[in-house]
């Protein structure tokens, strides 16, 4: 296998001590190249999942441990520009000099082994030990993306009867068991930042990465039985498709543009030849009734709306994601909503590190996804920017009011939701290398400031009133 991610040799002096931030695909590629060239000394990895990465031949540290380590450079090995920006900001805030923080580029190199031979991380039974038609799929870690990809993996399972699928992801212990509950073809959820997948992928009949594109890493056609002819045909079409639309071209902005020209949305665009049977943007999710008692223990009122500030990011308010609605707008909206609908409460949900919004009595921040599902199911409306909780709420049948700025509305929106867009500048997501930044370099993107609290109230007032009227009539 060849590398795609070239270590930034030109920015790192030879013989220096280097930490690699990120033990996933990119970080592994970086380490292999240093192991091959002996250009510098890798003194360890830094990764939030350090406790699960005990088999590397160098230490793996938690981000909070960086301050006490001895190194000359810390090389950020993360694929997403947004995540790189988050890490750079966090490192800078910890007092690390900017000259020590390095980013990398994409290129090719050679493969090297970086694991201890006695590594044991996953203690279950792998799919390739259960079925000849074994499939390994490497997934990303975001909530919305994994809900979207479920349609893809359901389609792959239909193309490969009697298959057993292992899903590798950093959210294998959190999001995936909830999203894939009740799927009989799932063999295991394997917690992995990328190293375990790369070490095991050659054992499977098929190993592939599924993101906004398909990347087949391993295909042993001799292990696919006669029932898998449609799968083999689909994989042939994937290869042909990737010659026309490379993964880079189908990332973010160009991917949404491709959807516009082909009349597809973020769900249906994955069905490149119709084989996967993806006809709409609805995903079936099974609810765990065991969390019902925990939901009622929260003591939420009969009528409430939910809202999410932060979109999963825990940056400071001054360095928030460009698609985020301003904090002061949330504050103004909450005040207006309480005046107009005093009988309806407000519940703040979202990431554990989200900033607390004032005037809110009930919150569920960083809660288990099963419990979040119950909260969303009983909400009469969810307010958010386009993101994972919108996808989750919509699939559960809860109407959302979605504030669209840089995210392309035609590509990502659900028709049944209240989708709001304002101003003359929007739909630029993916143009800028960093999605955290406005493409016009505005401190507050015009696309979001144009969506005023008054405008949102105009859009939702009739809907909330109709819900309350219907309940009174009953």
Image (cartoon, grey):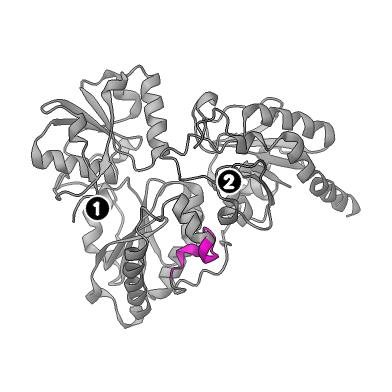
Q: Are marks 1 and 2 in contact (CB under 8 Å)?
A: no
**Residue 13 placement: quadrant:** top left
Rendering coords of residue 166 (x, y %): 35, 59
Q: Secondary structure at mark 2?
A: loop
Q: Earlier in the sequence, mark 1 or mark 2?
A: 1
Among the 4 quarters of the image, the one containing residue 238: bottom left
Tag shown at residue 386: 2
Whole-percent x, y for residue 122 in the image? 29, 50
Q: Determine whether, in the image, residue 399 is placed left or right of residue 155.
A: right
Residue neighbourhood size for the residue with mark 1, other residues' Cα within 10 Å, grouped as few (<14), some (14–19), many (≥20):
some
Residue at screen point 49% across, 56% down: 257
- Is residue 367 at all visible to an observer of this figure? yes
Residue at 40% x, 25% y is: 90
In this view, the residue in front, 187 or 36, is: 36
- Residue 183 in percent (x, y) is at 47, 64
Residue bearing mark 1: 198
Residue placed farthest to the top in the image?
95
- Residue 275 vertical position relative to residue 97 in the rendered view, above or below: below
Percent position of residue 22, x then y: 30, 37
Which secondary structure, mark 1?
Answer: helix
Residue extent of the magenta highlight: 261-272
Q: Quadrant of the C terminus?
A: bottom right
Res 177 seen here: no
**Disc 1 or disc 2, which is closer to the eye?**
2
Q: Nearer the viewer, residue 77 or 447?
A: 447
Residue 50 falls within the magenta-colored stretch: no
């Amino acid at each position: 296998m060849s590398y795609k991610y070239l270590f930034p040799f030109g920015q790192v002096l030879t013989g220096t001590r280097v930490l690699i931030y990120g033990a996933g695909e990119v970080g592994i590629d970086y380490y292999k190249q240093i192991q091959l060239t002996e250009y510098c000394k890798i003194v360890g990895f830094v990764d939030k999942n350090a406790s699960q990465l005990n088999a590397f031949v160098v230490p793996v540290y938690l981000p909070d441990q960086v301050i006490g380590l001895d190194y000359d450079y810390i090389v950020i090995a993360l694929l997403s520009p947004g995540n790189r920006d988050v890490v750079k900001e966090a490192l800078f805030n910890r007092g690390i000099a900017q000259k020590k923080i390095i980013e990398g580029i994409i290129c090719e190199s050679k493969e090297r082994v970086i694991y201890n031979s006695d590594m044991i991380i996953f203690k279950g039974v792998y799919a390739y030990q259960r079925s000849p038609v074994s499939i390994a799929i490497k997934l990303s870690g975001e909530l919305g993306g994994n809900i979207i990809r479920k349609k893809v993996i359901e389609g792959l399972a239909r193309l490969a009867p009697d298959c057993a699928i292992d899903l590798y992801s950093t959210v294998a212990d959190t999001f995936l068991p909830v999203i894939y509950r009740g799927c009989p073809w799932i063999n295991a959820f394997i917690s992995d930042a990328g190293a375990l997948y790369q070490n095991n992928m050659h054992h499977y009949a098929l190993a592939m990465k599924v993101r906004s594109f398909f990347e087949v890493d391993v295909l042993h056609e001799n292990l696919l039985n006669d029932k898998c002819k449609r799968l083999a045909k689909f994989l042939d079409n994937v290869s042909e498709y990737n010659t026309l639309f490379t993964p880079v071209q189908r990332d973010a902005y160009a991917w949404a543009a491709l959807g516009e020209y082909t009349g597809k949305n973020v769900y249906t665009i994955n069905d490149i030849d119709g084989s996967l049977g993806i006809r709409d943007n609805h995903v079936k999710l099974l609810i765990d009734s065991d969390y019902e008692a925990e939901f009622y223990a929260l003591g939420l009122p009969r009528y409430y709306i939910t809202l999410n500030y932060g979109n999963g990011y825990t940056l400071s308010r001054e360095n928030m994601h460009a698609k985020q609605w301003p904090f002061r707008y949330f504050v103004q909206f909450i005040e207006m909503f309480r005046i107009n609908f005093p009988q309806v409460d407000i519940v703040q949900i979202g990431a554990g590190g989200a900033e607390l919004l004032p005037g809110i009595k009930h919150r569920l921040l960083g809660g288990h996804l099963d419990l979040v599902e119950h909260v969303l199911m009983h909400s009469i409306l969810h307010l958010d920017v386009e993101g994972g909780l919108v996808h989750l709420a919509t699939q559960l049948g809860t109407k959302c009011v979605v504030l669209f700025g840089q995210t392309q509305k035609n590509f990502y929106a659900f028709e049944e939701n209240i989708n709001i867009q304002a101003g003359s500048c929007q739909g630029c997501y993916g143009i800028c290398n960093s999605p955290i930044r406005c493409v016009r370099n505005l401190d507050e993107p015009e696309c979001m400031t144009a969506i005023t609290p008054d405008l949102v109230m105009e859009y939702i007032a009739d809907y909330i009133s109709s819900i309350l009227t219907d309940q009174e009539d009953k």
